[in-house]
Amino acid sequence: MKAIYSALINPKWEICKGMFFVFLLCLYHRIYNLLYNILDGKFDDSDIFYVDRILFIVLICVMLVYLRAKFLKFVRKDWDSLILLGCSYFQRFLLFFLTNYYVLILLIYLGTMIFKIQKLTVGLSISVNVLNAILIFFLSVLSCVIFHAKLLKHSVCVLAGAMGIMVGTKKISFHNVYLIIMSDKVSQLLFSANILSVLIKIILCICLLFVLIYKCKNSGIDVSITESHSVKTNVTGDFTHWLSKNYLYFKNYFWIYRNTDFILWKIFSTIILVFICCTELGSFVIFLIAYGICLISSLYFADSYNLERRLFLHYYMSDYPYKKILSDFTKGGFFILGDNILIILLIRCIVEPRNIIILPLIIITIFFISIFVNSHLFAKYPLKQYYVNICLILLKLHVPVFHFYFLYKCIRNGERNWENMDYEHDRSIDYRQYN
Amino acid sequence: MNMTDQLIIDNITKLYDNKYGIKSVSATINSGEVTAIIGPNGVGKTTLVKCIAGLLQVSEGTILLSDISTSSRSCKPQIGYMQNELDFYNKMTVYEIMDFICKVKYAGKFCEEIDLYLKKYNLYEYRNSYISELSMGMKRKLSIIISLIGTPKLILLDEPTNGVDTYGILQLKADLAKCSQKGSIIIITSHVLDFLEKICSRCIFLKNGMIIQDIRLADNKVDLENVYESIYIT
């Protein structure tokens, strides 16, 4: 079980998640105050309660949909392997829970914040939200087992239609919704910690567990889930096709955003930069933080470099010039490194135009990091040793004056190597492991 | 395309650690000719095709396409190569890989052919699917399209029929006939003799890395099964 679990998780991703939660915990009071101030600034006292409750319902729905999608992915990807490894139903569900515990922690974290606005103590909020999280976990798994993709789609359409008719005939109005959400029953069941609501939730959890066991034993979860399986498509495909048809350098940019680690890092770095920009710190500190973010982001060039190694045959079967490939990677790398930084700094400059000086400075810096790291990675393309030396490349970047010499040398070496590339020799390197 | 283009394979030998992969192979293939390379597993069909594509360096001899060595980079855009191993990057979509190839190999030309070929081979609805989501047959069809796009001077297909559905094979036949008419030199390796008999004008039989028989099908009616049996079975 332990071995299977360690095969299912990505240690790098787990460390990132851990860091993210520590960061969130440290900023708990700041985020709470920010949320409360936003609500307080826009709504009066009774409306704060109402909007806060709406937020909680939205949070539950988002978590439910997300967990359902995660469970479907888990079944498609790992379910059969786990059966072959002899895992029981309980072990499989436990593995799903362990690999997705962060969703539940996030729910407890945000739920506790929302409940604090409803004047509940932190201790009670956490205990109520732990129950809510377990309930949502069971509901998301059951929704996969009971509702097939088609059935769910039809049900949602019917519900949306019914809702539309009721709104149209004024059977449902904003006032009605307000009354329902603010009613005593909803308050007691969802937003309080009385014995009755806790008992109802525990009973509900047990019932859902029994239904799940019954469905697993009788109808077979495997069949009902695999039935809803279909070929996955990239929804933005036509758009990215148009872009990459005209601008090849976007290829790596789009591709790198399919890397979960990278998305997490981008979100994390964006949050950090936004926080720094919101403080009274000067432009120089912001520049340094942005520079640090760029350096860490450049570590992801190794991933895009692995993509190129897989496309080696197609490069080899073409006469694509080195200058073009370096230019593509530099442009693509520029966006990979600095997309979020540039957007944030641009907004900052629009709000405070006197800060505009930082913008060209950071553009030049990002561009230089991009060309420096990419030229080093491709100096002996597609040799493997250049994959591991990215830290050394970053160290070389910080040798003043000489870095221009290193850059020149790498571009020259890369061009020479590109023109005399040998497929047979390079194929002996095993790069299949990176797929 | 020049109808006088020729592929000249001049006495090539390929050694793998002092063992012969192919030995003293010579042939001249003219423009518009569809040539099959036939033989059981391990006789050197894929090695020969890879040598012609310039992917493997020959130990002796030369391979020239219109007087340019096929191993030179300037000759590569003239070669459409479908490899036997389906070596795609799984996290790219069908469109992305096609765009990438058109851009890299043909500097953005023939991009308009992508949709046409995808529709022809029933892959259009999967254009935004990741490669990992495609079946083996679909991947092979994609590989066929990659080798045919732009109608290069030399088309090399290494076992193109493996796992491809009947519709795909019929489409491939039609496309190869068109390319042949336009003057492409086509070389195919396959174990399906019926398929080869219908599309090829010439068959080269390999044994122990050497050409054992070179037959022109257009000249006389030849039963490939009988030839195959006489060379390899009896």
Image (cartoon, rainbow, N blue to C red):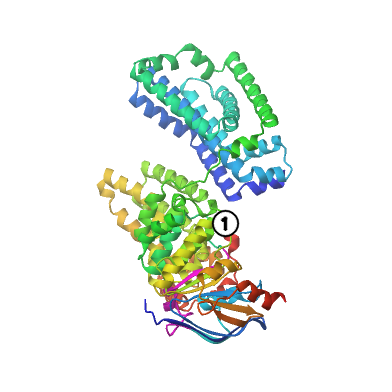
Query: x, y percentage for residue B27?
Result: 53, 84
Query: x, y percentage for residue A52?
Result: 43, 24
Which picture quadrant has residue B112?
bottom left
Residue in the image at 50% along x and 52% along y? B130
What SS does tag 1 mark?
A: helix
Q: Is residue B195 magenta?
A: no
Q: In the displayed structure, does residue A88 sit left or right of residue B219?
A: right
Query: x, y percentage for residue B167?
Result: 50, 56
Which sits in the foreground, A65 or A79? A79
Q: Quadrant of the N terminus of chain A?
A: top right
Which picture quadrant has residue B109?
bottom left
Q: Residue furthest left?
A: A353
Q: Is residue A235 above or below residue A68?
A: below
Residue in the image at 65% along x and 42% along y? A79
Q: In the displayed structure, does residue A349 sit left or right of residue A98?
A: left
Q: In the displayed structure, does residue A61 sit left or right of residue A3?
A: left
Residue in the image at 38% along x and 28% along y? A37
Which sits in the foreground, A171 or A302? A171
Specify the subunit that label 1 lies on: B
Residue denoted by label 1: B136
Q: What is the magenta range?
A: B64-85
Q: Quadrant of the C terminus of chain A?
A: bottom right
